[in-house]
Image (cartoon, grey):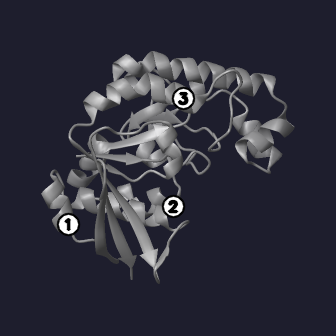
Amino acid sequence: MKILLAPSETKVSDFGEGKPFCKDNFSFDELFDKREYILGIYEEHLKNTSLQNLSDWFGLKSIKEVEKYSKSPRYEKTAKAIQRYTGVAYESLSYDTLDKKAQQYIEENVVIFSNLFGAILAKDYIPDYKYKQGAKLPNINIEQFMKTEFSPFLDEYLGEVVVDLRAGYYEKFYIPKCQVVTYKFLKGGKVVSHWAKYYRGIVARTLAQNNIQTLKELFDMPLDGLKIKEITESKNIKTFICDVD
């Protein structure tokens, strides 16, 4: 069972021990040329844009930080994507505190939708970089490019059921055709927005800890701090509506 997750491209760790950007760092060899094409456009944008404009593009206030990320990440050391990203969902997933079996589950089953590298697995090695959600590159629509170029491969790769824990924005990158399970989180009868990222990480962690493989196992899976209130269905999407303790 595959899990779809959004990236955390403004909150990243800066360590790296892996080889710089290369085909060996990524799953799905047939998609590497797509990744290299986008990286090339990204590099040109960094080279041809002033630090002040890059500050807005990255969403960074510190010019020192802007200077750091204005250089191409192509030649930097890399780290596993699941350890590179450090946003709220990744903190609550807490990969480093999982046992080896659960870590392997995450590495093999979590598909992350990077604005820069496209669909990658949690185990793929990526450099330290910045890319604010919704930021535009010149002469290309990233969302449409990813959707056009990556969707045919993902349709075959993902299998019969996926757990979609992405923010709605990433539907612009890919809409699954298979059976989809999503989650909605309520507190006091109101939809949780910002903290939804935290609970998505909890769901992904629990899937790994329980080695969930089937839809039935997913239905029966206990969620610490969450109680399934209702399950709604629309087309190929089942939504688990959960009350937050």
| Whether residue 147 is situated above or below residue 97 in the rendered picture | above
Q: Which residue is mark 3?
A: 144
- Circle 3 sits in a helix, a strand or a loop, which is it? helix
Query: Tag 1 or tag 2, which sits nearer the N-term?
Result: 2
Within 10 Å of disc 2 (Cα), the crowding (few <14, some 14-19, many 20+) is some
Secondary structure beneath dot 2 equals helix
Q: Amino acid at mark 1?
A: Met
- Image coords of residue 68 (percent x, y): 72, 38
From the viewer's perspective, is residue 50 above or below residue 237?
A: above
Residue 71, given in percent of the width and then of the height, sits at 70, 29
Q: Which residue is mark 1?
A: 221
- Horizontally, is 89 left or right of 106 in the view? right
* Three-letter code for the amino acid on which mark 2 is drawn: Val
**What amino acid is labelled 3 in the image?**
Gln
Determine which quarter of the picture holds residue 95: bottom left
Out of 91 and 115, give the one closest to the viewer. Answer: 115
Q: Nearer the viewer, residue 121 or 72?
A: 121
**Distance Cα–Cα, label 3 vs label 2:** 27 Å
Cα–Cα gap, marks 2 and 1: 22 Å
Work out which residue is located at the far front of the displayed protein and give it: 235
Left or right side of 141 for 86? left
- Give the residue drawn at x 20%, y 41%: 160
Which residue matches tag 2?
88
